[in-house]
Each structure stands twice: as structure tokens, then as C-alpha cells.
Image: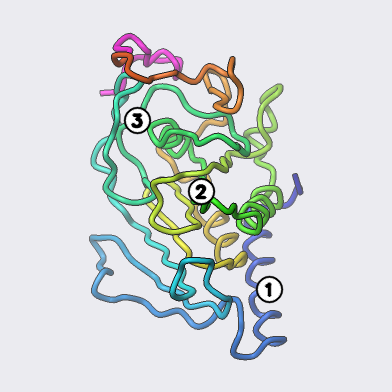
């Protein structure tokens, strides 16, 4: 993973957008921002809509990027493993979750939302995508570029065997758009490929969760049969799954 600061990544993304604008004219990657003022207020969420010049992904009518920030998270309780949770935003931007979280990495299997919301609580950014049956290689490649080009996190690098940064990439079949990203209190959705705006979202919202930790202790790997992820099926929720996963008492 490239070792530069998250602020540097934001500058690089902005520079990319400016250069793209100069080279492509009306087909720029980062056009002027339209703010939906009906959704913006000092006390509530703020929504910013971008209209990049990229072609829409298959099945989408237009190229649109929507970033919502300032989303209030009313509850962040641990619930028993395998308990389904309904979230107020899509992708989730916080809320109740299971006591386990996912290892910070890129996944082929779908990480349950109730798991990756715990990653958001730890300050992670989740990069998510919804693939048609024909596949979405270009989407996966762009998200993987953003993930690997993001800076290393000094807090993570101090942990033996720890991840380089708190980033998770996962398929998510419940998304409304082909591309999404989530952080605590913020979401990003896109119907086209716009790497500069996604890189900016990662840089601006990384490490903003209420718990500032990089630990992979008690984390699970859903790609591995023995990775520790629960196999819920029709089994009843595991009421004893433990808030000890965080190394502390149950959350209030």
C-alpha cells in the first residue's frame, strides 16, 4: 500500500480532477458541484450531488455521484450475532451491529452489513459494489485502486501483524447503486466510475468513527471457511456472542 498521508491523497485526487478537466473539456471527472439545498441544514445531513462526464454503468440512466454527510447515528449497540438489522441509509452509515467486525482487507464474499458497520465504528471506510450477473470487473478494479492507493495508517502500522489501513472492500447485493462507500455518519453512491470523488470521500471520512482502533483481534474473514464468521442459516441468534470481542464490557 502506498505510504503517503490521507491529506496528500486528497490533493492528488483534486489534482487529477483539475488535470482531467483541462484535458477533456466538458467531459471532466469532477465538474462543478450542485448542492441539493433542500437536504442541507446546520442541524441535519448535507447532500452534495456531482454529475461527472463519465458514461453510466450498465443498467444506469445517468452518471451521478451523491455524497451525504452529517448523518445522525441514533444507536450503536451490539446485538446478538445473526440478528438482522435494518439501516436508515443505503449503504449503512452507522447503527446497531454485531460484536464482531471484518478484517481490514478486500473480500470476494459478501461481508454482512451487521459486521461491516462495526468496522465503520472503528473508523473504517467501506468500499462496496453491486455486480450484475455478467460481472463488473471495471468497478472492482477501480475500487481496488482506491483502496490500495490510500495511505498507510500509522496507528495500524504500530500493531504487529495489523492491517496497513482501516479499509474494507466488499460486494453488497442490497445496494441501490453499482458503487458505494460508507463511513460513520457519511455515505457515497455512484452510478458511474469517478475515481477522484471516491478518493476524496475516503480521505475526508477516514478515521471518523466513535472508536479509534485498528485491531484485527476478534475480527473475522468471511472469505475463509475457518475465518470465524458466523454461519447463521436458520440457527437462532447467539445471545452470548460477546461484547468481549471489543475487549470490554457490553456497550450501553
Q: CA distance from mark 3 to mark 2?
A: 17 Å
Q: Quadrant of the C terminus?
A: top left
Colouring chosen for the image of the structure: rainbow
The 10 Å Cα crowd at callout 1, few under 14, some 14 to 19, many 20 or more, is: few
Question: First in sequence: mark 2 or mark 1?
Answer: 1
3 or 2: mark nearer the eye: 2
33 relative to 82, above or below: below
Q: Which residue is mark 1?
A: 15
Magenta span: helix, strand or loop, mainly? Answer: loop
Q: Is residue 241 magenta?
A: yes
The disc label shown at residue 97, or none:
3
Which contiguous range is marked in magenta? 238-252
Find residue 5 and report its horizontal and vertical position in percent: 68, 52
Quadrant location, the N terminus: top right
Question: Which numbered disc, 1 or 3, marks the residue closer to the eye?
Answer: 3
Residue at mark 2 to residue at mark 1: CA–CA distance = 25 Å
Question: Badge 2 is on which residue?
Answer: 128
Residue 110 is inside the magenta segment:
no
Disc 1 secondary structure class = helix
Q: Image check: 122 left or right of 224?
A: left
75 in relation to 46, above or below: above
Amino acid at each position: 500500500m502506498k505510504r503517503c498521508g490521507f491529506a496528500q491523497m486528497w490533493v492528488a485526487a483534486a489534482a487529477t480532477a483539475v488535470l482531467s478537466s483541462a484535458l477533456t473539456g466538458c467531459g471532466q471527472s469532477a465538474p462543478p458541484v450542485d448542492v441539493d439545498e433542500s437536504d442541507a441544514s446546520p442541524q441535519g445531513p448535507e447532500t452534495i450531488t456531482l454529475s461527472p462526464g463519465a458514461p453510466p454503468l450498465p443498467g444506469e440512466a445517468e452518471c451521478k455521484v451523491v455524497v451525504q454527510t452529517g448523518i445522525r447515528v441514533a444507536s450503536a449497540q451490539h446485538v446478538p450475532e445473526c440478528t438482522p438489522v435494518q439501516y436508515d441509509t443505503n449503504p449503512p452509515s452507522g447503527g446497531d451491529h454485531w460484536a464482531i467486525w471484518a478484517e481490514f482487507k478486500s473480500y470476494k464474499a459478501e461481508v454482512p452489513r451487521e459486521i461491516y458497520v462495526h468496522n465503520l465504528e472503528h473508523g473504517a471506510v467501506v468500499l462496496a459494489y453491486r455486480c450484475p450477473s455478467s460481472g463488473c470487473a471495471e468497478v472492482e478494479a477501480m475500487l481496488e485502486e482506491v483502496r490500495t492507493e490510500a495511505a498507510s495508517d500509522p496507528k495500524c502500522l504500530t500493531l504487529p501483524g495489523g492491517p496497513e489501513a482501516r479499509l474494507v472492500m466488499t460486494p453488497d447485493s442490497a445496494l441501490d447503486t453499482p458503487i458505494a462507500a460508507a463511513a460513520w455518519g457519511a455515505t457515497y453512491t455512484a452510478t458511474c466510475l469517478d475515481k477522484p470523488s471516491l478518493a476524496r470521500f475516503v480521505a475526508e471520512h477516514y478515521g471518523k468513527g466513535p472508536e479509534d482502533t485498528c485491531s484485527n483481534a476478534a475480527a473475522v474473514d468471511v472469505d475463509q471457511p475457518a475465518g470465524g464468521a458466523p454461519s447463521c442459516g436458520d440457527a437462532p441468534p447467539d445471545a452470548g456472542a460477546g461484547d468481549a470481542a471489543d475487549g470490554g464490557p457490553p456497550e450501553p
